[in-house]
Amino acid sequence: MQQSNNLAGADIGDFEKMMAVFAVIIQSVISFVMNSNPPIGQQFFFGGIYETVKFSAPAFIFGILYSTTRTHPQASILEYPQFIHNRWHILFVPTIWWTFIYLLFLPQLQQHYHYHNWQGFCWQFINGNAAPHLWYNTMMLQFIILMPLFWWLARLVAHHPYRAISIFCGTLLLEDVWFYSYDLQIFHGPLKEQFYFF
């Protein structure tokens, strides 16, 4: 995969990822503070900050997609095997090791439905619930697997502002329908337990 020197520097995506990680750390600190039962006024203050920094997941994914698309401007499906090979060593292998460590040595950190058998262990392993922050890793790895789609989308809208605006509006409409359906069926609806991943 060809990368020129001007593509190697930090960009908006890198700063976005840094801010997202900082927001995750802030969320953890605020959770500890809230467990100490501070006065009501402080609870509102820290609760407001906690809600403000919840942008971390979409910000982190935006950072990954932006940086990866920018640093691989001509990438195609033919270069995907080499891309995945590189990502395997820097992203997948550490995630596999950390997941094993968390599940075997710190099982109390699991989120949702602790494992009690091998099937549960495998499920917790692949879904990112071995520890709170591994959900971010799993989400990031899903987007890395889907990178050819985003490379294609970036080339589709490059230098075509009307096409970009149309895709943006269509995506926004689908997102609104998604959130409305989610609110009715999952968030406070009958499918809350079955579809907690949504």
Image (cartoon, helix red, strand yellow):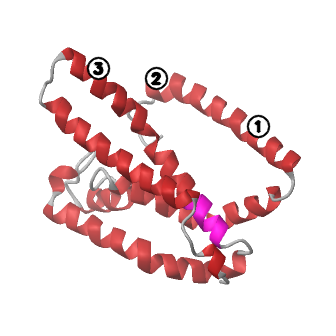
| Residues in magenta, as a range | 64-71
Three-letter amino acid code at disc 1? Cys
Read off the residue under disc 1: 169
**Image depth: mark 2 or mark 3 in front:** 3
Helix, strand or loop at disc 3?
Answer: helix
What residue is at 29 percent from the left and 72 percent from the top? 97
Which is more N-terminal, label 3 or label 1?
A: 3
Please tell me which residue lies in front, 138 or 184.
138
| Vertical placement of residue 165 versus 105, above or below | above
Three-letter amino acid code at disc 3? Phe
Read off the residue under disc 3: 44
Residue 71 placement: quadrant? bottom right
Q: Is residue 111 left or right of residue 68?
A: left
Three-letter amino acid code at disc 2? Gly
Residue 58 position within the rendered picture, expressed as x and y whole percent measured from the top left: 51, 46
Read off the residue under disc 2: 189
Residue 128 position within the rendered picture, expressed as x and y whole percent measured from the top left: 36, 56
Residue 40 placement: quadrant? top left
Q: Is residue 126 left or right of residue 59?
A: left
**Image depth: mark 1 or mark 3 in front:** 3
Residue 177 placement: quadrant? top right
Magenta stretch: helix, strand or loop mostly: helix
What residue is at 58 percent from the left and 75 percent from the top? 8
